[in-house]
Amino acid sequence: MMPELYTSLSQDKVIKEAALRSGVSKGIMQACWDAAGEVIKAWATEGHSVALPGLGTMRFGLRAKSVASAEEVKAGLISTRRIIFTPTVDLKDELASTAIQITCYDRDGKEVKRVTSTDPGTVEDPENENQNGGNQSQNQGGGSQNQGGNQGGNTGGGGGEDDDVTYD
């Protein structure tokens, strides 16, 4: 069985709903959406952290191998290019208070079970029960594991292999 955790909404549906909620035409909303996307893409690729109003901020980052000296630095050390999103506190709070619905289907597509959470948003982890005080998530508060790290410019150095690398 496989749980269905979320459904995907098309961009067209999002544009239509945003136009409805804002009172502007769908064409104007599409133009604004497209323009905002181009601005976000341009600024993020220039190394800026870009605010997404009501959602949070996004920036591009890299994963690269660490080297001992500046002479060893080369583009081939980059292993992954990433998009890093940091949600606002309001968005995190909204997610924590939102009921989660899980629907399980068998291999034939027949619904087998549907569960809706009514819990306070804590994550049960029986394997780590003794390590973190019971049924508490180890990453309470969410966010990036490497928030704030490696933002001192391109000075090199730092931890082990596959470290997050950011740029200013």
Image (cartoon, rainbow, N blue to C red):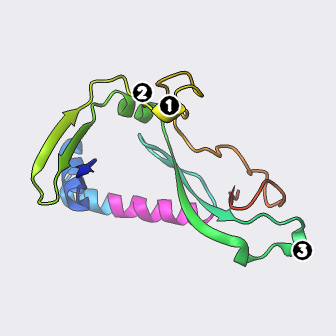
Q: Which is closer to the viewer, label 3 or label 1? A: 1
Q: Which mark is residue 122?
A: 2
Lateral position of residue 105 relative to residue 131, left or right: left
Q: Which residue is mark 1?
A: 137
Measuring from the top left, give residue 43's x and y in whole percent.
56, 61
Q: Is residue 127 left or right of residue 79?
A: left
| Amino acid under disc 3 | Glu
Q: Residues within 10 Å of mark 2 (few under 14, many from 20)?
A: few
**Residue bounds of the magenta highlight:** 33-46
Q: Quadrant of residue 155?
A: bottom right
Given residues 12 and 109, the one toward you in this image is 109
The reply to whether the C-beta atoms of the residues labelled 2 and 1 are less than 8 Å apart is yes
Q: Nearer the viewer, residue 91 or 75?
A: 75
The tag earlier along the polypeptide, 2 or 3, is 3
Callout count: 3
Q: Amino acid at mark 2?
A: Thr
Residue at (42%, 30%) from the top-left corner? 124
